Image: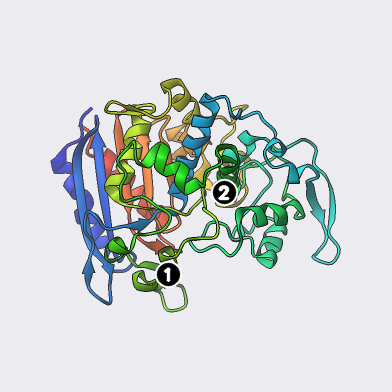
Amino acid sequence: MQLSSEKLNELGNFFDSTYVPNNLPGYSVLVHQDDNEVYYYQAGEIDVNRKRNLNRDSIFRIYSMTKPITSISIMMLLEQGKINISDEVEKFIPEWKELSVYQSGSFDNLITEPIKRKMTIKDLLMHRSGLTYDFEETSFVQKIYLKEDIKIARAKEKLTAEQYIKKLADIPLAFNPGEFFNYSISTDILGFIIERISNMSLEEYFKKNIFEPLEMEDTFFQIPKEKIDRLANCYIYDQTNDKYIVEDDYENSSYIEKPSCYSGGGGLLSTIDDYMKFCTLLQNKGSINSTNIIGSRTAEFMMSNHLEDNVDLYDIAKGKWGTNIGKGVGFGLGGSVVIDPIKNMSLRSKNEFSWGGAASTLFWVDPEEKISVVFMTQMLGNPLSQEIRSDLRNFVYQALI
């Protein structure tokens, strides 16, 4: 089936009338099919007060859309024989040999017990490690992260990677590795492991092995001075006054300064065209044009569902993924995988590989229809984020004829 350009035009019309007035300062969407651009649309502003229009080369904080890039990097090291997904994490982080798991108690009286089995690289890739995020209210351990300032997925970090690793050695896991799915700093830990194996910073590793080969010239952890004027403001939803306010202004953005450590879980900036190059790499199973990054079998393995026993995220996830949005959705080695579109109550294709970012960005790669989509905006805490993503998919797939 082919996408109709005429029907795709309905997407922009709907979003302009429904979301731009109240929920999105500006957005852009890029759709490819069979590696060809079939639709691009932009609307709104990247800076409401200064009236800076959103442009095709606008630069966005992609937050957790950094994660699949880190996963690809792990797959590259796997192909080189430097890591296996079955490896225990303590092989690369010996500081974590004596991890414990939280049972009960409070800050002054923590009750823990030894973990039942060792944490593996696959646990990190699948957010089944027992780690958490400071904002995931799924365990008392989240409160410990807040108290100890474990906030890795930020642009300007307070601690180095080694300091984070040392701190986390003394904080219990929220659950035993493999027991649940819980969105977490796991991918940041993978970034630290990549640095230890490669003897390179994550920034250097990404640049040499992914960004330069794919000609992703506008993707980085720290924005160059000459490109600052293209950086979008990042907004956050103000629940009290029901409006969005500036969370990170481009002129004094934290992304201007070099971070103390590089967040493989959420630290990158990118453009819509740069990220589409990465999606094309995924769509073509590890290659783009004549450039090969990983083997096709490795790419397929990474983007396959790795949940076992016919369970989905609804069955095993803590937090929002344990709600209806997790129905019919599995998980690969770095992103969600649709396993049952009917159970998911959506028009999505089976085996769609996808993930989003905290500022309401989204990508997906549909191998069945050969469709790749990147959606960019800059809106944290958007109460309509799931509705936006659902509508986006509906308007893309209604255009198939």
* Quadrant in the rendering for residue 142: bottom right
Question: Which residue does the numbered mark 1 point to in the structure image?
Answer: 237
* Quadrant in the rendering for residue 144: bottom right
Q: CA distance from mark 2 to mark 1?
A: 26 Å
Q: Relative to 170, is 231 above or below?
A: below
Rendered location of residue 271, percent (x, y): 30, 51
Is residue 186 toward the left or the right of residue 325 in the image?
Answer: right
Asked if residue 126 shows in the view, the reply is: no
* Quadrant in the rendering for residue 191: top right
Name which residue type carries label 1.
Answer: Tyr
Which is nearer the eye, 319 or 115? Answer: 115
Question: Which residue does the numbered mark 2 point to in the structure image?
Answer: 188
Is residue 291 toward the left or the right of residue 263 in the image?
Answer: left
Mark 2 or mark 1: which comes first in sequence?
2
Is residue 73 toward the left or the right of residue 285 in the image?
Answer: right
Rendered location of residue 88, percent (x, y): 70, 34
Q: Residue furthest left?
A: 6
Is residue 90 toward the left or the right of residue 153 in the image?
Answer: right
